[in-house]
Every structure is written in C-alpha cells, then in structure tokens.
Image (spheres, rainbow, N blue to C red):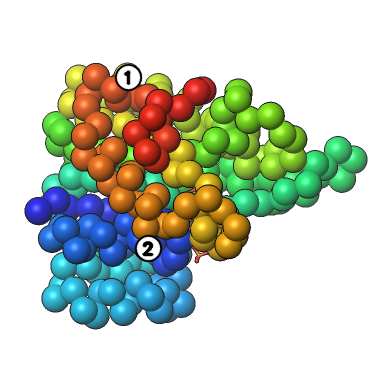
C-alpha cells in the first residue's frame, strides 16, 4: 500500500488517478481547490472506508498549500502527483496581454508544484516520487503558436523540476515530468485522443517504474521519452 497525494483531484485526470490508486489498495490524500464542489471526489471518499480523504488545497496560494499538506497528517508520503493546471489565455496576445491570467498561469504551473513539493518534502524518503504534469506544448517539437503562458509555464516547470531532480538525487527522491497525452477532460475536450482512464493508468505504470537514474527526465503517458 502506497501513500499518495494528488493535487487538482476534483476532476479530470487527477480524479481518475485517485480512483485507480484507491482501487489498487493505496491510501489517497486527494487535494482539491474547493472540496465542497468536488461531488465525484466526495462520493469516492464516502465509499473508501477512510482510505481516500479530501482536503482543501489551492496550489496558487502558499498558506493553502501548507494547510492542505498539514491536513493530510505527518506520516510518510510515497507519491506526489502535481496535476492541478489551467489553460489560461488560448489566443496570441500582442498588444493587450491579460497579465492577470498570464501571472496566474505561471503561479499555478510553476510556483504551485514547487510549493507542493516543499510542503511534502520533510515526509519524502528514499524512493519517494514526485510526478509533475507538463504538456507536449512545453516541448521544442510543438509546432503551433497561441497558448503563450500555458506553453511557457509548462516548459519552466520542466526545467525547474529537472534542477530539483539533481538537487534531490542524493536523498533518493525521484522527480518525474510527464505529458499526460491529449486527454478527454474539461481541458482536452471530447474530441481529444485518449480517455482519462488510459492516461491515468499509463502514468501510474510509468510512475511506479520510474527509477532514480531517470529522475528529471520527461516522458509521455505511455512510457515513451518526450523531447524537451
Ligand atoms: N487534458 C489534456 O489534454 C492535457 C494535455 C496536456 C497536459 N495536461 C495537463 O494535465 C493536468 C490535468 O489536466 P486535466 O485535463 O485533468 O484538466 P481539467 O480537467 O481541466 O482539471 C484541472 C484540475 O486542476 C484543478 N486546478 C486548477 N487550478 C487549481 C489551483 N489553483 N489549485 C488547485 N487545483 C487547481 C481544477 O480544480 P477546479 O475544479 O477547482 O477548477 C481541476 O481539478 C494539467 O496540469 C494539464 O495542464 C492536460
């Protein structure tokens, strides 16, 4: 049984990850920005016999991340999934940038996972893993424009976590960066390529098999290496 913490767990891929880890017999700390609105997650918790608990955590806010992590107790954590994310502004903005949304996108995608990692770090031992959700839009291979803050912030997240992977290698903590696929969620829309079930199940396998030698690397949900 693993102790798992998942951000952004109210819906989408994170909700499915929570469901699959619960089915696997794990102890799941599900972190949601607004637990009162997380009906599907609360239903999972109600049927979990106490193995899945829901806690409030807005990854964009220091105090909320600290309080959310503290609410999960003080025991060891084996796996942290930094999933919470937002699209922000899609169209290119050249003469009238929405700086508020731009800053929020960086805050949620870059500072958020760092806050979460810092909050759980005292409880991460050798072999613990922190899996960070990036995107194919972060890579040099993505040929399209638009999504400026989204793409740039996910690229920054990857670079940040690659540095942290080097810093934490001596402690045996594995840092993963993953593109979850183009997934049928609120974010990906109904025409996306894969289901949340496929994405979550691929990422669980990938996370379980992620070794310290590959800490700081960037993979696709199906286990293939991703270009930077
Ligand atoms: N779907 C895709 O095709 C795709 C492709 C590449 C990468 N990704 C990445 O994969 C991750 C999951 O995507 P998804 O498709 O599951 O997205 P989603 O269905 O839109 O769900 C996003 C989740 O993130 C949460 N969230 C947003 N801002 C938050 C904050 N400040 N604090 C805490 N939680 C917050 C949302 O909570 P609320 O319900 O409170 O809003 C929601 O639970 C994201 O990081 C996304 O960028 C997705």
Residue 49: image location, x then y, percent: 14, 76
Q: Is residue 73 left or right of residue 187?
A: left
- Residue tagged by mark 2? 15
Residue situated in front as seen by the camera: 224 or 23: 224
Q: Is residue 202 found left or right of 190 in the rendered image? A: left
Which residue does the image show at 60% across and 25% down from the upper left?
Answer: 141
Q: Position of residue 36 (x, y in %)?
A: 42, 78
Q: Is residue 112 left or right of residue 102?
A: left
Q: Nearer the viewer, residue 149 or 91?
A: 91
Residue sitting at x 28%, y 46%: 204
Seen as rendered, the residue at the extreme right is: 95
Q: Answer above or below: position of 47 versus 202.
A: below
Q: Is mark 2 within 8 Å of ligand 1?
A: yes
Tag 2 near tag 1, CB within 8 Å: no
Q: Residue at x 86, y 38 (%)?
A: 94
How crowded pointer 1 is (Cα within 10 Å; few <14, some 14-19, many 20+) is rated as: some
Quadrant of residue 38 in the image? bottom left
- The image shows residue 171, relative to residue 48, as above or below, that is above
Closer-to-camera residue (82/112): 82
Depth check, mark 2 against mark 1: the one in front is 2
The answer to whether any part of residue 111 appears in the image is no
Whether residue 146 appears in this view of the structure is yes
Q: Residue 101, position in %: x, y?
A: 69, 51
Residue 68 percent location from the top left of the image: 33, 60
The local secondary structure at tag 2 comes to: helix
| Residue 35 image label | none
Q: Secondary structure at mark 1?
A: helix
How far apart, in angstroms, are the residues tagged by discs 2 and 1? 30 Å
The residue that label 1 is drawn on is: 166
Horizontally, residue 180 falls left or right of residue 202, namely right
Pick whichever, 169 or 140, lies toward us.
Answer: 140
State whether residue 51 is above or below residue 13. Answer: below
């Amino acid at each position: 049984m693993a102790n798992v913490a998942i951000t952004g767990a109210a819906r989408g891929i994170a909700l499915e990850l929570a469901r699959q880890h619960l089915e696997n017999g794990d102890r799941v700390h599900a972190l949601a920005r607004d637990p009162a609105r997380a009906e599907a997650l609360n239903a999972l918790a109600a049927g979990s016999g106490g193995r899945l608990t829901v806690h409030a955590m807005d990854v964009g806010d220091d105090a909320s991340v600290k309080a959310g992590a503290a609410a999960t107790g003080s025991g060891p954590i084996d796996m942290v999934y930094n999933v919470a994310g937002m699209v922000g502004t899609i169209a290119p903005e050249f003469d009238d940038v929405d700086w508020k949304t731009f800053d929020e996108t960086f805050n949620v995608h870059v500072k958020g996972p760092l806050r979460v990692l810092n909050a759980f770090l005292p409880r991460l031992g050798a072999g613990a893993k922190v899996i960070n959700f990036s995107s194919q839009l972060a890579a040099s291979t993505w040929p399209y424009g638009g999504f400026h803050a989204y793409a740039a912030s996910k690229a920054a997240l990857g670079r940040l976590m690659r540095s942290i992977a080097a810093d934490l290698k001596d402690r045996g903590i594995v840092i993963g960066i993953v593109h979850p696929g183009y997934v049928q969620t609120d974010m990906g829309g109904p025409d996306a390529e894969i289901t949340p079930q496929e994405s979550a199940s691929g990422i669980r396998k990938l996370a379980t098999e992620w070794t310290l030698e590959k800490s700081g690397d960037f993979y696709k949900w199906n286990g293939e290496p991703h270009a930077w």
